[in-house]
Amino acid sequence: MRALQLTKPSSDPPSLTLTTLPTPSPTPGHALVRITAAYINPSDLINTKGGFGLTTYPRVPGRDFAGVIESLEPSSSSSTTSRDDDPPPFQPGDRVFGTSGRVLSFTLDGSHASHTLVPLAALTRTPASLTDAQAAMVGVPYTTAALAVQTARVRAGESVLVLGATGAVGTAACQYAAALGARVIRAARHERSAEGVDLLADPGLEKVRELTGGKGVDMVVNTVGDVALQKSALGVLAPYGRLSFISAPRSGSTEFAFELTSFYRKQLSLLGNNSLLMSLEEAAQSLRELVPLFEQGKLQVEGEDKLTKISLEQAVDAYADLAKGSRNKYMIINQ
């Protein structure tokens, strides 16, 4: 099979090449998936730079994917349970999608290849409402957003401020919080909506106080990783408020200091979230819980017209382009 592969023969950063590898054979409890679409996430780029200490080499990168089950080990296609509410067992030809948890592309070969071998428990049936390319954009952003919102126990009727609302995780967090019945306030650079905050013009988040009548918000999802903005967000939380964040600065100081007296008197919570602590099975369960929301139209992946579709043979150049700061959204499509 054709695949991208990371190698790291020394202490230097890994090198990424297009190569030919043996196509895996199905093993018990696993499926050989023919990859039809695989997105290049920002974290995939970080992985190719050696940014994750858990990655072992050589390794095929690629955290998210959609595809078709090509083959199964014979015993894997039969159901081992008899519960009436169990889904039918997977079969060759089934459309599936998935995401990495802490495994795929780190310690198990990922999706930037023509095929990948994946545990059946890590697969989710692709909803009919999504194309394969759209399904391949769901994994990391939507499971991370769901994690951040669920950790903060958002309830219907609460107000949620999303920092970085136009990014992949931020967009997913806005949709997911709204699907749960929360009022969503979007914050991003150049945000112009009535229920929005322009982070360039208002880094102190004063408009949040205006929008909430001075009460503040019940929850903040911070997808930005900026320390000053995190401090501003802490200041606009209502009593019992929760600040849920998913990242930290990639350079400079990562220390975050805040005033303890108001923090405990308002009974606030500060919650860190790391999707790389999820197992493959936990990540798949998160996707399965999101599928009904996609089917109901409460979650919507952006259209394929926003993507730059490339072949696997063009993917090394796409990674190089992203490393230079390109904002293209590259989707590997296997014909």
Image (cartoon, grey):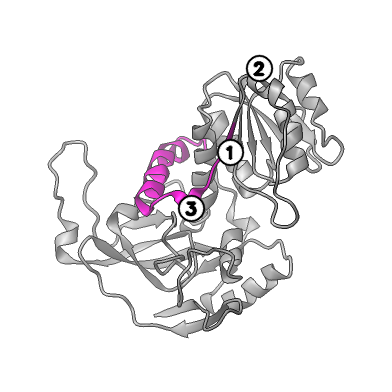
Q: Which residue is mark 2?
A: 265
Q: How many marks?
A: 3
Q: Is residue 246 left or right of residue 3?
A: right
Q: Earlier in the sequence, mark 3 or mark 2?
A: 2
Q: Amino acid at mark 2?
A: Arg
Q: Residue at x 51, y 68 (%)?
A: 333
Instruction: Inspect this view and state whether residue 41 appears.
Output: no
Q: Residue at x 34, y 54 (%)?
A: 122
Q: Residue at x 21, y 51 (%)?
A: 89
Would residue 292 be counted in the magenta stretch?
yes
Distance between mark 2 and mark 1 Cα atoms: 28 Å
Quarter-of-image position of residue 207: top right
- Viewer-nearest of labels 2 and 1? 2
Q: Which residue is mark 3?
A: 276
Region in magenta: 270-299
Q: Is residue 202 left or right of residue 226?
A: right
Distance between mark 3 and mark 2 Cα atoms: 33 Å
Q: Position of residue 135 (x, y in %)?
A: 47, 53
Depth check: give the residue in front, 9 or 148: 9
Quarter-of-image position of residue 185: top right
Would residue 88 be counted in the magenta stretch?
no
Q: Earlier in the sequence, mark 3 or mark 1?
A: 1
Q: Which residue is mark 1?
A: 173
Q: Is residue 213 left or right of residue 131?
A: right
Q: Amino acid at mark 1?
A: Ala
Q: Which mark is residue 135?
A: none
How many C-alpha atoms fall within 10 Å of the one at disc 1: few (<14), some, or many (≥20)?
many
Above or below residue 131? Residue 38 is below
Q: Secondary structure at mark 2?
A: helix
Q: Position of residue 71 (x, y in %)?
A: 25, 68
